[in-house]
Amino acid sequence: MSDSRLSVVCWSRIIGLLLCLGLLHGCSAIKLGYNNAPDLIYWWLDGYADLTEVQSLKARDDLARLQQWHRTTELPKIVELLQTAQHLAPGNTSEEKVCGLFADVRMRFDAAMTQAEPAAVTLAMGLSTAQLSRIETKFLKTNAEWRDDWMAGSLAKLQAKRLKTAIERSEEFYGSLEDHQVSVLRDFIARSDFDPQVSYAERLRRQQDLVRTLRQVSALSGDVRPGVPQATAALRAYLNRSVNSPNPAYRTYLEKEIADNCKALALLHNSTTPAQRERAVRRLAAYERDARELSAQR
């Protein structure tokens, strides 16, 4: 996963986070992706930890229950957020409104994380030394890929890549961007304080923190009754450190990145034409229909 900043993208990325717990972007196959989310998450977990048969059965069962809870409890709340976004999309917006929507999205994500906590504790307490070593090895591989994506090449190359991604995601939502709208994104990226070195250092800190926490939690597996509350507290503390970095310099950096991204997204939206905003409303309405239909499935 990349750094935790709010990227300069379109509303569809925000809605993708809403609908698929941050795992999928908004797209025509979103219902298929949502319905297959337990399998996708399972394979992601297995790719890191190489789960045993017993762990696999438990994880699949827990993920199925989590999805059912999300269908019945969270999707109706997501429908409400989508309706709010539809009301906002036809008019101009502001940095404060965009960041407010992002905060609402984070609340829904946090609710899902809280619901998943007992299953996460059970899985973490059952990890073996070999599995923890595999996780560390997997981190080495993903870190190399991250460096290739964000730290290789010149600043101009990185900015061009970010611009291309931002344009593609924005056009999924608004349709083709006009030259002055592309300039909004280009100017933002040129002025952005985004620093891959800073983000990478925080990425490493989180990974090292996670491995230490998992080792601490797995050591509690021998004494389940007192171990569970201790493991829960340890994982909850780790998650808090992931969201609120213990590094004050990084917290300041991230807060500015989020504010700058909210401002840039507002500027982009405010530069769109009535036809582009109408397309945005239709896309939001389609997401709302998808959310309602997914919630009705059992």
Image: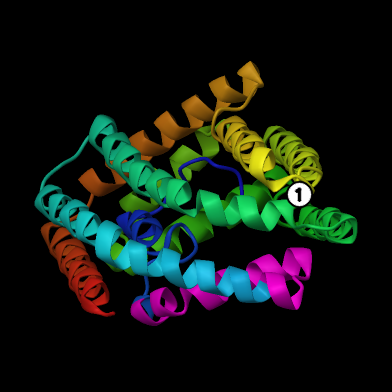
Q: Is residue 208 above or below residue 146?
A: above
Q: Is residue 37 magenta?
A: yes
x and y, in percent, of residue 115 in the image: 43, 51
- The question of residue 65 being in magenta is answered with no
Tell me the residue at 65%/68% (across/down): 44
Name the quarter where the N terminus is drawn: bottom right
Q: Is residue 158 above or below residue 45?
A: above
Extreme residue toward the top, this view? 248
- Please tell me which residue is depicted at 14% across the width and 50% down the height of the picture: 84
Residue 153 drawn at (x, y percent): 77, 51
Check disc 1 and report its element: helix, strand or loop: loop
Residue 121, percent across and down? 62, 50
For the residue pair 121 and 204, the one nearer the viewer reads as: 121
Residue range corresponding to the magenta coloring: 31-55
Predominant SS along the magenta part: helix
Which amino acid, by three-letter code, is at mark 1? Ser
Q: Which residue is mark 1?
A: 221
- The quarter of the rendered structure image containing the C terminus is bottom left
In this image, 94 relative to 264: left or right? left
Measuring 46% from the left and 57% from the top, which residue is drawn there? Answer: 22
